[in-house]
Amino acid sequence: MEQKPSSRPFDLLNDAINKEVLIVLKGDVSIRGTLKAFDAHMNIVLENAAELLNGDQKTKYGKLILRGDNILLISP
Amino acid sequence: MEQKPSSRPFDLLNDAINKEVLIVLKGDVSIRGTLKAFDAHMNIVLENAAELLNGDQKTKYGKLILRGDNILLISP
Amino acid sequence: MEQKPSSRPFDLLNDAINKEVLIVLKGDVSIRGTLKAFDAHMNIVLENAAELLNGDQKTKYGKLILRGDNILLISP
Amino acid sequence: MEQKPSSRPFDLLNDAINKEVLIVLKGDVSIRGTLKAFDAHMNIVLENAAELLNGDQKTKYGKLILRGDNILLISP
Amino acid sequence: MEQKPSSRPFDLLNDAINKEVLIVLKGDVSIRGTLKAFDAHMNIVLENAAELLNGDQKTKYGKLILRGDNILLISP
Amino acid sequence: MEQKPSSRPFDLLNDAINKEVLIVLKGDVSIRGTLKAFDAHMNIVLENAAELLNGDQKTKYGKLILRGDNILLISP
Amino acid sequence: MEQKPSSRPFDLLNDAINKEVLIVLKGDVSIRGTLKAFDAHMNIVLENAAELLNGDQKTKYGKLILRGDNILLISP
């Protein structure tokens, strides 16, 4: 595979550290927040996060750990 | 990856020991309680825990073990 | 991680041997019974167990093996 | 862990060989039959088995293999 | 475990080679056909298979591969 | 196990290369197409594929990769 | 298996780098975008992506990471 290392999924996550991301979980839950950290299981730490319902903020969280297992997509 | 160790998901859990956390499980179950312990599977021990329904306490538990598999998010 | 071994999830299970526990499974099934044994997959043996429906006993079981996979939470 | 080997989940299964057991699968399927064998994945062989619907026998099976993955509980 | 090797789940499958079996999959799909082969994941090859709906044949298949993951039970 | 190698599930897939197959996925999705390749996870490559709805072609795909995880059955 | 390496599922993905793909996720979510990268778990990076609802663009994403676990099919 001739991909440059910088283009792989976890590199894109690394580039998004300290930036705002949108994460969609299984079960139609969307979370927006600042990406602070992740690990090899794609477990995610967000700060200043908010659960979104139809685009509106529903619940706010200072810090948040999301389990990688249940993540559908991440948009940096 | 240039993250400092202190920012990773399990470090954030470790920092939350003896503090109150909110945990959302699959199947729309929310639990609030004092984080007492966890292991590498993200199995969690809470004390003075309560299942929440629309923000109200539904069931109280002195101690509680939650399986990591079914955890959607943890908010320290 | 600076936790004392005695505070980890499986230690709490071990302390609950021969005591009554409440176990909530996926699919909204709750079981109460005396914890007799468990293994590393969190498979559980209960005695004098009863499935609960809205707090009432629905089905009684002398002995019961629960698969760890399907356990949401255990309250010792 | 100070449990005697005889109390573990797979030992209880072993003690139930040739006895009648009730098995509840995911998806609200209950099966009663004589336990003939099992393996390390908790795959189960039953004889003279019947699927139960509200306590009545719905479908009878001379022999039956159940996948361990989908088992919620086993009552010996 | 004092079981004779001939009684284990995969042995029962092996004995059913070239015989008719009924297989119930997750999602309420039942398939009847002649068992031709299987592997260690319980992936199954059937011949002259038919999907059943309320006991009637709905779709016929000359040959069929079923993924072991999604199998609830097999009745030889 | 006394099966000849030629009868195993992956051998049947290999024999179906360049032939038309019907694949049923979890969630009631059926796909018909020419089998071009597969790997050890049962990930599948189809050409000239079409998603079927009640036997009619709903969506056509020139090429298609299907994840093995979500495959219920394959009919060569 | 006599397949040429160029025909395997991950090779087809590699050939689709920098081209537009359609990805269908579990839970009836379809995403269209330019494939930029993937890894061995079939985690995917898309650019200029859009979630589709009945063929219309619903939500646009500059960049997107999709977890391989939840992918049903990919059409290059």
Image: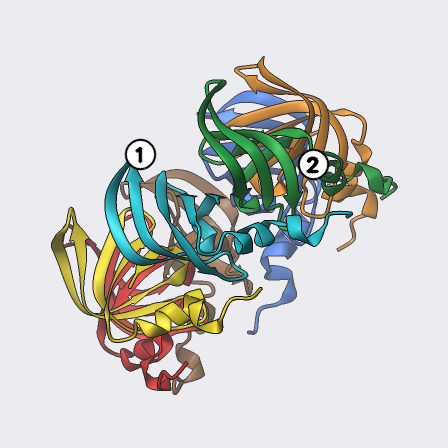
Chain colours: A blue, B orange, C green, D cyan, E yellow, F red, G brown
The residue sitting at 69% across, 50% down in the picture is: A39
Residue G40 in the image: state x and y as whole percent.
Answer: 55, 65
Residue F4 in the image: state x and y as whole percent.
Answer: 35, 86
Residues G10 and G58: in front is G10
**Is B58 situated above or below A16?**
above
The residue sitting at 73% across, 47% down in the picture is: D3
Residue B71 visible to the viewer: no
Graded by Cα atoms within 10 Å as few (under 14), some (14 to 19) or many (20 or more), the crowding at tag 2 reads many
Per the image, label 1 sits on a secondary structure element best described as: loop
**Is F11 situated above or below E47?**
below
Camera-side mark, 1 or 2: 1
The residue sitting at 54% across, 42% down in the picture is: C66
Per the image, label 2 sits on a secondary structure element best described as: strand
Same subunit: marks 1 and 2: no
Quadrant of the rendered image containing residue C11? top right
Please name the residue that numbered disc 2 is placed on.
B44
Amino acid type of the residue that numbered disc 2 sits on in the rendered structure: Ile
Q: Is residue B4 left or right of residue B60?
A: right
Quarter holding the C terminus of chain B is: top right
Amino acid type of the residue that numbered disc 1 sits on in the rendered structure: Gly
Please name the residue that numbered disc 1 is placed on.
D55
> Whole-Å distance between the Cαs marked 1 and 2?
37 Å
The residue sitting at 69% across, 34% down in the picture is: C18
Residue E68 in the image: state x and y as whole percent.
Answer: 39, 62
Q: Residue furthest top?
A: B56
Residues D72 and B27: in front is D72
